[in-house]
Amino acid sequence: MRYPVTLIAGDGIGPEVSAVMVRVVDEVTDGRIQWRNAPAGGGAVAAGMVPLPEETLDSIRETRIAIKGPLETPIGKGWRSVNVSLRQALSLYACVRPVVSLPGDYRSKYSDIDLIVIRENTEGLYSGREHEVIDGVVEALKVVTRESSRRIMRFAFEYARNHGRKHLTIVHKASVMPLSDGLFLDCAQEIAADYPYLQVEVLPLDNLAMALVQRPQDFDMLVMGNLDGDLVSDLCAGLVGGLGMVPGANIGAGHAVFEAVHGTAPDIAGQDKANPIALILSAVLMLRHIGETGAADRLGSAVRTLLFEGKSVTRDLGGTTGTSGVGDALIEILSRSES
């Protein structure tokens, strides 16, 4: 069976890490993925298009699956985040960020982390509804709905059930925002009643932040709103070596977009120095999502072997291997596993 997948290579280091990801995915699937290149971000703007062209959205609507490198978002000017626009246009309401300790010596402070961050992806303060009330006063609207809160909770509880997770922590700040975060908690308790075999706790955001620094091993699955999830998922990535080691998925009822969650790193773009591991691990999630579990297991195992051996890793992981060299090493490990 062949699978059409929309590929957004990305900006900055995006094309380099995407090229390596495509090579190793083609290797592990025997070419069963049919890549459809689509523009977005700074590259699309440079070509005279809007940051998120309708043709790119149409491609994802057709293939239903996409994977993307990092995209440029100008700070305070230019265009709105393409990542946010993608999630809203395709109703990719669930952001899934697995945070797992990997083998190897790459400046990680912990070696026993295995948690999942689930983030509501379409509303909250990231709804983008802000305006200037009077000169020098800006108001931002936090939108929380029962429908979206119940939807993300149902997704999280089903994810826990299907992936062997037993303990869900619902994160909130209801003491300060009793209506919006209170609604979020009410929906969590409502959905939790359908899953009596799962352990559920609620924890204020500030308490969670302290606990993640002191004892991150205590957590199994975290569920929270949009802005909180954005911050906490990056904090959790720091527990296992940084954003270059963590995959990401944005999942909706009909479509899924997998992505590297790190930045475009324009200072090293085009120099064969970028770490492609995050996008490759995102491809592992993608392969598992489309039912290519054997290929996903082989590629995930190859990444762990690469990091355990430590001979072919990029500069940020303490090595000297280039981006393309990581791809060469992974293909060599995959060929070894076949013999």
Image (spheres, rainbow, N blue to C red):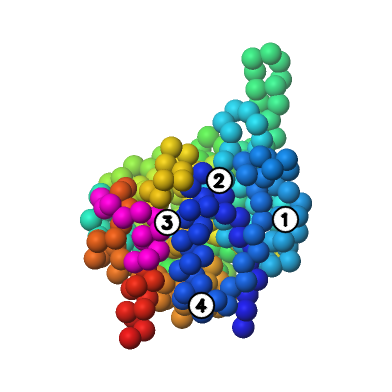
What is the C-alpha distance between the residues marked 4 and 1? Answer: 25 Å
Residue that appears at 46% across and 43% down: 269
What is the C-alpha distance between the residues marked 1 and 2? Answer: 18 Å
Towards the viewer: 244 or 166? 244
Residue that badge 3 annotates: 276
Point out which mark residue 57 bears.
1
Residue that badge 4 annotates: 29
Tell me the mark number nearer the camera, choosing from 4 and 1: 4
Q: Position of residue 136 (x, y in %)?
A: 64, 14
Question: What are the residue bounds of the magenta stretch?
Answer: 317-329
Residue that appears at 65% across and 31% down: 78
* Residue 79 magenta-highlighted: no
Tell me the mark number nearer the camera, choosing from 1 and 2: 2
Residue that badge 2 annotates: 11
Examine the rendered structure and indicate whether residue 317 appears above or below residue 47. Answer: below
Quarter where residue 251 is shown: bottom right
Lower sequence index among marks 3 and 4: 4
The total of numbered circles placed on residues is 4
What is the C-alpha distance between the residues marked 3 and 1? Answer: 25 Å
Q: Amino acid at mark 3?
A: Pro
Residue that appears at 42% across and 76% down: 297
* Residue 325 magenta-highlighted: yes
